[in-house]
Amino acid sequence: MRKVEVIGGQQDGRSRMRERRSKNLPQHIVLSFIISALSITAFHRNIIWKDNLSLWKDVTIKSPSNPRGHNNAGNAHKENGQKGLALIEYEFAVKLKPSFSDAHNNLGVLYKEEGLLDEAINEYILAARYSSIIHKKVIYENLGTAFSEKGLVGEALHSYKEALKIDPANSDILYNIGFLYAKLGLPDMAIKFYTEAVRVNPEDLGARQELERLLIAR
């Protein structure tokens, strides 16, 4: 067993215990300071992140070159009805990253809501170009709706069919295609897609009603 050397002479057990306590005291003080600091940090973070907008604005301030932060700040502004500020954030996000599909799509949604269909279509096309397969369906649906509202039925059909390739059992897309074929005066094609919409979603009352109407008219 190794000899324990005590500097300053031999000490009894009680003095050694007192020494340990005195040596441990600074550790407790340091630990208290750390806990207090963490508590203060958490308190300030809760103030900063009291809502979604505060969180993402904090991100844009601390990481101004983060395009996702600006995109999400734009989403938060839009949720709060601050479309002008949302537009600034989305535009800055695509300036930082021109291939940022989500921001292009969000710009498209904002432009469409303001009735700026040409601008919306341009943004949706860019979004589709850069998007991964995960988000392409939604983007093509948005693009189809913008084309349809602009009266470009052929382009709208193409966009909806691109979305349908990704999600062939989507009754909303099938309904929209049926609606456009009916608008073009092609009832047989409309019936085909309405029938499929009802097959994949028997609770789609809109598709069922349009299908019944066309079948009666036939």
Image: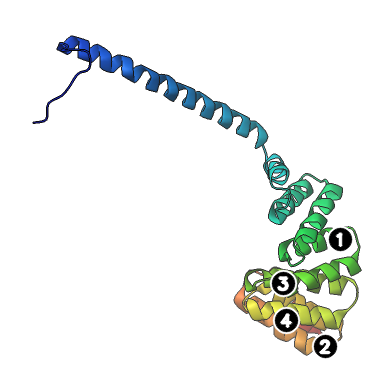
Contact flag, marks 2 and 4 (Cβ < 8 Å): no
- Which label is found at residue 130? 3
Residue 213 visible in the displayed image: no
Q: Earlier in the sequence, mark 3 or mark 1?
A: 1
Q: Position of residue 9 (x, y in %)?
A: 18, 12
Q: Position of residue 11 (x, y in %)?
A: 17, 11
Contact flag, marks 1 and 4 (Cβ < 8 Å): no
- Which label is found at residue 36? none
Q: Which one is in front, 95 or 25?
A: 25
Label 4 element class: helix
Pair 2/4: label in front: 4
Q: Which residue is mark 2?
A: 186
Q: Position of residue 38 (x, y in %)?
A: 52, 29
Circle 3: residue type: Tyr
Circle 1: residue type: Tyr
Circle 4: residue type: Lys
Q: Earlier in the sequence, mark 2 or mark 4?
A: 4
Q: Which residue is mark 4?
A: 161
Tell me what residue is drawn at x 71 percent, y 52 percent. 72
Contact flag, marks 3 and 1 (Cβ < 8 Å): no
In the rendered structure, the answer to whether residue 32 lies left or right of residue 75 reads left
Label 2 element class: loop
Label 3 element class: helix
Q: Earlier in the sequence, mark 3 or mark 2?
A: 3
Q: Residues within 10 Å of mark 4 (few under 14, many from 20)?
A: many
Q: Position of residue 152 (x, y in %)?
A: 88, 78
Q: Which residue is mark 1?
A: 111
Q: Residues within 10 Å of mark 3 (few under 14, many from 20)?
A: some
Q: Taking 171 as reference, is 81 above or below it?
A: above
